[in-house]
Amino acid sequence: MKKPTAVLAKTVCVLVFVSLCTGSVAAATIRGRLVHANGYAAAGVMVTVVNQQAGRSAPAYAGPDGIYYLYNVPPGSYYLEVWITPGGKPLVYPIQVVNPATDIAQIGIP
């Protein structure tokens, strides 16, 4: 039976090797806050990011405080989409994503 530390060391080495061979880039976390025009948090509003190379991210939803997080987004230029009405058209904002985290200025929505 192999020692757990030996297995862990091999796993880390394989992951580093695969990362180096595939040229993968570390991903960033995007954080922002949505508020209504009256200043109250916009809880439950869906946000995504999209660009030509990466496509559209999985959706995130603003929490009770209006704060949302999008995880594992590769660095680059994106459009932040704020989906106020399901099935409608989103509000769109150009953003630049950098590692390890990108903070988006507070966004006021109707």
Image: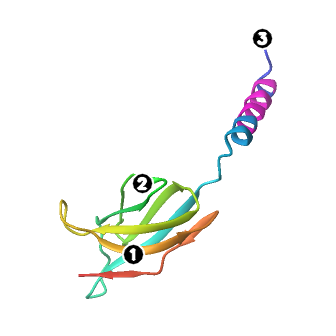
| View extreme (bottom): residue | 38
Rendered position, 40 above or below 53? below
- Whichever of labels 2 and 3 marks the residue nearer the N terminus, that label is 3
In this rendering, position of residue 88 left or right of residue 69 = left
Q: Which mark is residue 57?
A: 2
Q: Secondary structure at mark 3?
A: loop
Q: Residues within 10 Å of mark 3 (few under 14, many from 20)?
A: few
On whether residue 47 falls in the magenta region, the answer is: no
- Residue to which mark 1 is pinned: 93
Q: Main secondary structure of the magenta part?
A: helix
Magenta stretch: give its range.
Answer: 6-16
Mark 3 belongs to which amino acid? Met
Tell me the residue at 44%/58% (across/down): 52
* Residue 97, x across and y down, in percent: 55, 67
In this rendering, position of residue 2 left or right of residue 96 = right
* Residue 43, x across and y down, in percent: 30, 69
Q: How many marks?
A: 3
- Whichever of labels 3 and 1 marks the residue nearer the N terminus, that label is 3
Rendered position, 19 above or below 108? above
| View extreme (front): residue | 52
Q: Quadrant of residue 90?
A: bottom left
In this rendering, position of residue 92 left or right of residue 9 = left
Looking at the picture, the colour scheme in use is rainbow
Quarter of the image for the C terminus: give it.
Answer: bottom left
* Residue 19, x across and y down, in percent: 69, 41
Q: Which mark is residue 1?
A: 3
- Foreground residue among 26 and 106: 26
> How far is mark 2 from mark 3, CA to CA?
41 Å
Q: Residues within 10 Å of mark 1 (few under 14, many from 20)?
A: few
